[in-house]
Image (cartoon, helix red, strand yellow):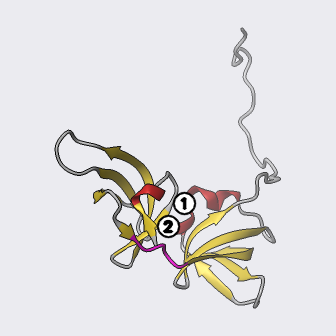
Amino acid sequence: MLSTTDFRRGLKIELDNIPYEIVDFQHVKPGKGGAFVRTKLRNMLNGRVVENTFRSGEKMEKPDMETRAMQFLYKDGSGFVFMDMENYEQFSVGDDVLGQKGGYLVDGMELTMLMYRGKALDVDLPASVVLQITHTEPGVKGDTVSG
């Protein structure tokens, strides 16, 4: 169980069986009445940001998430195909989950994936990726900036 005193940016909580990540929070102590915590939460299933207010000391569940070691295999029409490094099971993840991170995937790359009830939520890429530049525009005379 998590309390409002445990709140920090990036903390994951579960409300109404939906996992949320705390984007921003503010402890408020009004002159009259009890203290409360105003938060901005990102729905980890669809990416929407919602605002929610909690009474000070209120308890909530920690979502049942796990990280798994994965290997990126290839990209097909339906999304990106990964292999679980523990049981060698393959499954596809859509473009909506990866977003811009999909452009940095290289065949055979090992990474960690955040899972919630068997569904992929996020991918942690390695700190550095080696890519090859395949095309660049030619330089034009006078197309430089000098200090």
| Drawn side of residue 63 relative to residue 133, left or right | left
Query: What residue is shown with label 2?
Result: 96
| Drawn side of residue 33 relative to residue 91, left or right | left
| Drawn side of residue 133 relative to residue 26, left or right | right
Decide which of 3, 107 is in the foreground and name it: 3
Q: Amino acid at mark 1?
A: Gly
Q: Is residue 127 above or below residue 83?
A: above
**Which residues, given as a range, are shown in magenta?**
60-64
Query: What residue is shown with label 1?
Result: 99
Residue located at (31% from left, 50% from top): 38
Quadrant in which residue 65 is drawn: bottom right
Mark 2: give few (<14), some (14-19) or many (20+) Cα within 10 Å.
few
Q: Position of residue 12 (x, y in %)?
A: 49, 64
Distance of label 2 from label 1 (alpha carbons): 6 Å
Residue 68 showing in the rendered view: yes
Secondary structure at badge 2 equals helix
Disc 2 vs disc 1: Cβ atoms closer than 8 Å?
yes
Secondary structure at badge 1 equals helix
Residue located at (48% from left, 72% from top): 62
Residue 78 showing in the rendered view: no
Q: Position of residue 52 (x, y in %)?
A: 29, 58
Q: Is residue 106 above or below residue 87?
A: above
- Magenta stretch: residue 138 in it? no
Q: Position of residue 33 (x, y in %)?
A: 18, 49
Q: Amino acid at mark 2?
A: Asp
Q: Quadrant of the C terminus?
A: top right
Q: Position of residue 63 (x, y in %)?
A: 49, 75
